[in-house]
Structure formats: structure tokens, C-alpha cells
Amino acid sequence: MNFNDYQKKALSTDLGAGKSNKYAHDPAYVDKILSFVGEAGEVAEKYKKIIRDKGGVISKEDKQEIIKEIGDVLWYIAVLADYLGVSLNELAQANVEKLASRKQRNKLSGRGDNR
């Protein structure tokens, strides 16, 4: 499956699909942004508990739970990208091009979005 296939399937499960999604204050945007952050927080929370409670040892079950949460993050990325009018393939391509440019210019580390 490629990114665009995934995005299409993800969108088929979006309860906000087909709504306006034109403005940042539209409920569909607000829901997706807040939920995206929440899911990313769940990834961090699971990781924190592995460090705090398990001495940093990641079990097979821990990996599976983290993978599920990362999948939820991916779903929100796919839907938000669609709301912004971009395919996941385009998003991924733009990101690797940005990172390749930073690497070529020795700017992978540092501050700022436009480095």
C-alpha cells in the first residue's frame, strides 16, 4: 500500500469528511488537530512508562501498543493533509526533499523551520 492508498482508506472512516473544512475554526479541523496532538501524547505517555516502570526495556507488547498509537497519529496526518488539499505522497515527497536539502547544506540540526 502506498501513502495515497492509505489516505483514501483513512478518509473513508472520517466522520468529518465532506464538510466545509475551509477555515481553521471549523469543528472538523479543531477536532483533528486536537486529536492528533492527543494521539502523539499517547505515544509519548507509553514511552515514558517504559522508562519509568520497566527500566527502559521495550517488550514485544509495548512495541505493539506504540505501533497502534503511531497508526492513529498517521490517520490524523492523512486526514489533515486532505483537509489542506495535499496528498500523503506529496507531503512525504516534500518532507524528504526538505530534509535532503538540509543535509546537503549541513543544516539537519539547529533551530527554525526554514533552515
Image: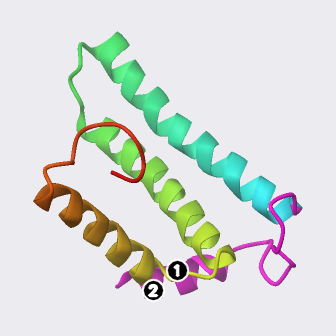
Percent position of residue 47, x then y: 37, 29
Residue tagged 1: 7
Residue nearer the viewer, 15 or 76: 76
Note whether 103 is above or below 80 in the view shown: above
Q: In which quarter of the image is residue 49?
A: top left
Note whether 112 is above or below 7 in the view shown: above
Rendered residue at 55%/81% (across/down): 86
In the image, which residues are magenta?
A: 1-26
Rendered residue at 46%/78% (across/down): 88
Residue nearer the viewer, 50 or 108: 108
Q: How crowded is mark 1: few (under 14 residues within 10 Å), some or many (20 or more)?
A: many
Tag 2 near tag 1, CB within 8 Å: yes
Residue tagged 2: 4
Percent position of residue 37, x then y: 61, 43
Magenta stretch holds residue 21: yes
| Figure quadrant of the N terminus | bottom left
Image side of residue 115 versus residue 71, left or right: left
Note whether 78 is above or below 63 in the view shown: below
Residue nearer the viewer, 3 or 66: 3
Numbered mark located on residue 63 in the image: none
Q: Quadrant of residue 20?
A: bottom right
Question: Which amino acid type is shown beneath numbered disc 1?
Answer: Gln
Percent position of residue 51, x then y: 31, 17
Percent position of residue 11, x then y: 64, 79
Rendered residue at 46%/58% (across/down): 71
Residue nearer the viewer, 40 or 57: 40
Query: Distance between the Cα atoms at labels 2 and 1?
Result: 5 Å
Question: Which amino acid type is shown beneath numbered disc 2?
Answer: Asn
